[in-house]
Image (cartoon, rainbow, N blue to C red):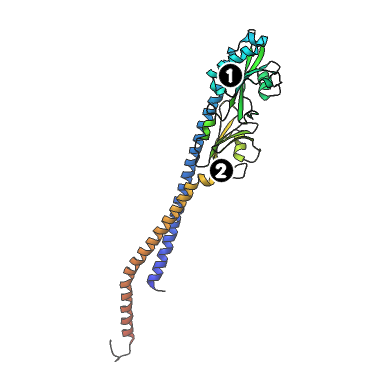
Amino acid sequence: MGLGTKLTALMALIVLVVMSATSAASLHYQERSLKQGLRREVDGQALIASRAIASFIEDSLHEAAAVARTLPRPALAARRTAEVEAHLARMLEVFPRFQNGIFVLDERGDFLTDYPVHPEVRGRSFAFRDYYRRTIQEGRGVVGAPYRSARTGNPVLTFTAPVRDARGRLVAILACSVDLLSQEALGGYRRQRYGDSGYLFVVDRSSHTLVLHPDDARLLTVISGRNALLEAAYDGFEGADETVNTLGVPMLLAVRRCPDTDWIVGVQIPLEEAYAPIAAARTWVVSGAAVAMALVIVLGAAAIRGVSRPLKQLDRAASRIAAALEAPEGAARP
């Protein structure tokens, strides 16, 4: 193996080691920075949504309480339902978020009246409903668990307010129903973009989950134990990290608790999509390092040839001189 070949091989090895180490360090730094940036972005989206949804819940409770304060007590006591229905119709114009319906239960939980009017349920007991039991137990307005409306098929949420007489005795319970997919509620989140295929969901302590995907808004019950990050959120964790959802798909998920509620807001994006910029950066760094190494080797080889050519000539000259000095006396000199 000639001197030039040996030098070229040595230089290629040195360049390979240096470039590999530099590229690996650069790639690690870029990946870490991109992941941190993506997590901050998704977490920020979840934080903003959680505060807005908490505000929606608080405002709805206040509006339900406002409607309850205006109810005509004499008409309720005398069960003059037509008068109560007319009043509820006027309140619906003032508080349009309750377009899914406003209804009144008596103190026993029996359905008294509503608007829009559904006479077929009048007199039926609603005492088994979660929102009725909790309002009675806590003595204040509550947010019921989300459920699917039998009339519309959409997920709905019920806000209650106790109705009391002049002496503070409970005489009825007002319930205001909100279609969660309406624009006055959470329907606007279906238009929010979280990457190309990410989406927002809301889950309560009972694992009732409202998925607000642009193409698939629905209410479902999440099977516990299948999403480690969501389980951690139940225990108080807030932030963003990698996880696997209940369908086994790797996700970048950010979870935030809605203040003063037991609701958790999650924003999640498929990990492959979320980390696509990282894969692109990895390809760019590796390709750039390979091109740079090839250029260095080619230019270095040319430089080595330029340096080694005089050395080769000197080596040949030295060989001829040595051969002449070793020739016997009288032999012809070159």
Query: In this figure, what is the number of numbered marks?
Result: 2
Q: Nearer the viewer, residue 157 or 316?
A: 157
Residue found farthest to the left: 333
For this view, does 179 lie left or right of residue 275? right
Q: Position of residue 230 (x, y in %)?
A: 60, 37
> What residue is pinned by disc 2?
251
Q: Give the residue pinned by disc 1.
A: 64
Q: CA distance from mark 1 to mark 2?
A: 38 Å
The residue that appears at 32% across and 82% down in the rendered structure is: 320
Label 1 neighbour load within 10 Å: few <14, some 14-19, many 20+: many
Residue 329 sits in quarter: bottom left
Residue at figure coordinates x 60%, y 22% from the top left = 101
Residue 165 visible (yes or no): no
Picture disc at residue 104: none
Q: Amino acid at mark 1?
A: Ala
Looking at the picture, does residue 163 appear above or below residue 189? Answer: above
Dot 2: element: strand
x and y percent of residue 167 in the render? Answer: 65, 7
Residue 169 position within the rendered picture, expressed as x and y whole percent measured from the top left: 66, 11
The image quadrant that residue 123 belongs to is: top right
For the residue carrying disc 2, how many other residues have a C-alpha within 10 Å: few (<14), some (14-19), or many (20+)?
many
Quarter where residue 83 is shown:
top right
Q: Residue furthest bottom?
A: 330
